[in-house]
Amino acid sequence: MRTDKEMMVQGIKKLALTVFLMFLAPIVIWQAFKNEEHPLYWPVLVIGLILAIYAIYSGFKGIQTIVDALFGGKGRLKD
């Protein structure tokens, strides 16, 4: 069994996006809570929560892609 390098790179890119979003989402949520009296409080809070949810989703998909690349998941053709 060989590792699918292209799929591995895709998984690492997804995890890099996850790390970025793991820092960005709490900052956006914190900015929303810091300015509760501002009229854009709710839109900024919703954007922060969407970023946080997408960070979790992206993390799971990145790990799943890396595992599939290492162990020959459904993305590879069976001989």
Image (cartoon, rainbow, N blue to C red):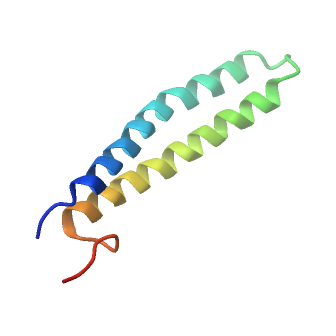
Residue 38 position within the rendered picture, expressed as x and y whole percent measured from the top left: 85, 17
Instruction: Classify 77 as above or below 2.
Output: below
Q: Nearer the viewer, residue 67 or 78?
A: 78
Q: Nearer the viewer, residue 42 or 72?
A: 72
In the image, farthest residue toward the right: 39
**Number of marks present in the image shown:** 0
Residue 69 position within the rendered picture, expressed as x and y whole percent measured from the top left: 25, 61
Task: Identify which residue is drawn at 41% across, 34% down.
Answer: 19
Residue 7 position within the rendered picture, expressed as x and y whole percent measured from the top left: 30, 56
Toward which corner of the image does residue 77 lie, by quadrant? Answer: bottom left
Q: Is residue 75 left or right of residue 40?
A: left
Task: Identify which residue is drawn at 23% across, 70% down.
Answer: 72
Q: Is residue 51 left or right of residue 43?
A: left
Instruction: Classify 60 as above or below 1.
Output: above
Task: Identify which residue is drawn at 36% across, 42% down.
Answer: 13
Q: Is residue 1 left or right of residue 50?
A: left
In the image, farthest residue toward the bottom: 79
Toward which corner of the image does residue 30 lie, by quadrant? Answer: top right
Q: Quadrant of the C terminus?
A: bottom left
Residue 12 position within the rendered picture, expressed as x and y whole percent measured from the top left: 31, 44
Q: Quadrant of the N terminus?
A: bottom left
Instruction: Classify 31 as above or below 64.
Output: above
Task: Identify which residue is drawn at 38% across, 37% down.
Answer: 16
Q: Nearer the viewer, residue 36 or 45?
A: 45
Instruction: Classify 28 as above or below 7.
Output: above
In the image, farthest residue toward the left: 1
